[in-house]
Amino acid sequence: MSARMIDGKSLATRLRSELTARVARFREETGVQPHLAAVLVGEDPASAVYVKNKQLDCTKAGILSTLHRFPTTLTTAELLDHVQKLNADPTVHGILVQLPLPKQIDELRILDAVLPVKDVDCFHPENVGLMVQGRPRFLPCTPAGCQELLKDAGVKTEGAHAVVLGRSDIVGKPMASLLIQKGGVADATVTICHSRTKNIAEITRQADILVAAIGKPNFVTADMVKPGVVVIDVGINRVGDRLVGDVDFDAVKEIASAITPVPGGVGPMTRALLLENTLRAAELQTARAKA
Ligand code: GUN
């Protein structure tokens, strides 16, 4: 048996087209164009491509996007200064600081400095806290994108055992938090595995839903999953000139009931959710004229 493909590319296209219509309506009603400021520090080629794609998505959706580019040698103080300027600029609704930042920059200080209502990545502790408590201001882009994929694929999460591989602040922790919420694409029983977990395969074999976000190419092998599992592969790893996920796709697809490909699975959904958050940020910061 071969698993059903969960097509993130086509779902993201659908979401983007709905969002484009909502952006147009918002602009008509308020006269305000949502604006995402993307901050890119250094010369990492992968980061440059990610940011360029995010900007392209914005333009297509009717969202203004500006690029704020800085040399690798930038200091924490200089970047803080720029973030404060973007915070104070009323025409900027969303601020995205592309990670990773160069080593000398204090990443947490920078992310903490982003005004919470402009924090479209949902990295600020205030927004993380609200999300964990089940009253989100923004949803974290990648985990929320995974939920949308599960919803669209008709996967029942209620009572399911979801195993999350990875404990990063960007994916693992917020993914687990979302899946244990009450209602929606949630109500799952969640286990988080990480680099210090013993007998990982024993745990992953119990998963009804497996979210792999561990950053190791082809980490999840066929012997680590049970028949019928739904696999969401968050990994993007460069192996030679190929992009591969955290899951050994060719082997695991023979055992799973549904699986996301890499590329074309989670990646496009992360970008779609960023647009959603940018529109939401603009809505939060703009008083709509009453009809
Ligand atoms: N680097 C890798 N993923 C992300 C993301 O979702 N947001 C930001 N800002 N940087 C990233």
Image (cartoon, rainbow, N blue to C red):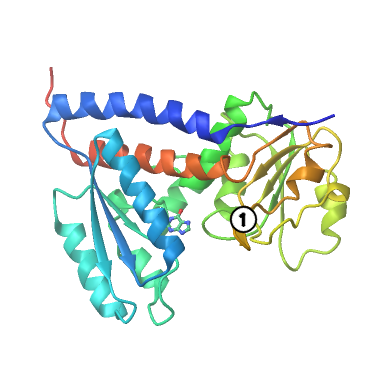
Front position in the image: 253 or 199: 253
Q: Residue at x 76, y 50 (%)?
A: 248
In the depicted structure, whether residue 217 falls above or below residue 94:
below
In the image, the residue with mark 1 has its CB under 8 Å from the nearest atom of ligand 1: no
Which x, y percent locates residue 262?
Answer: 61, 45
- Counting other residues with Cα less than 10 Å from the Cα at mark 1, is it few (<14), some (14-19), or many (20 or more)? few
Which SS class for mark 1? strand
**x then y, percent, for residue 208:** 77, 37
Position of the N terminus, as image quadrant, is top right
Residue 170 location (% of width, % of height): 51, 56
Q: Quadrant of residue 276?
A: top left
Q: Is residue 203 above or below residue 137?
A: below
Which image quadrant: the C terminus? top left
Does residue 124 appear in the picture of this structure?
Answer: no
Identify which residue is drawn at 27% across, 72% down. 79
Question: Total label count?
Answer: 1
> Does residue 73 lie above or below 128 as drawn?
below
Image quarter for ligand 1 equals bottom left
Residue located beneath label 1 in the image = 242
Q: Amino acid at mark 1?
A: Arg
| Residue 217 visible in image | yes
From the viewer's perspective, is 77 left or right of 27?
right
| The furthest residue to the front | 241
Q: Residue at x 21, y 58 (%)?
A: 87
In the rendered image, the vertical position of residue 256 relative to residue 89, given as above or below: above
- 106 left or right, relative to 197: left
Residue 121: where, in percent of width, then height?
Answer: 40, 51
Q: In the displayed structure, does residue 197 sit left or right of residue 184?
A: right
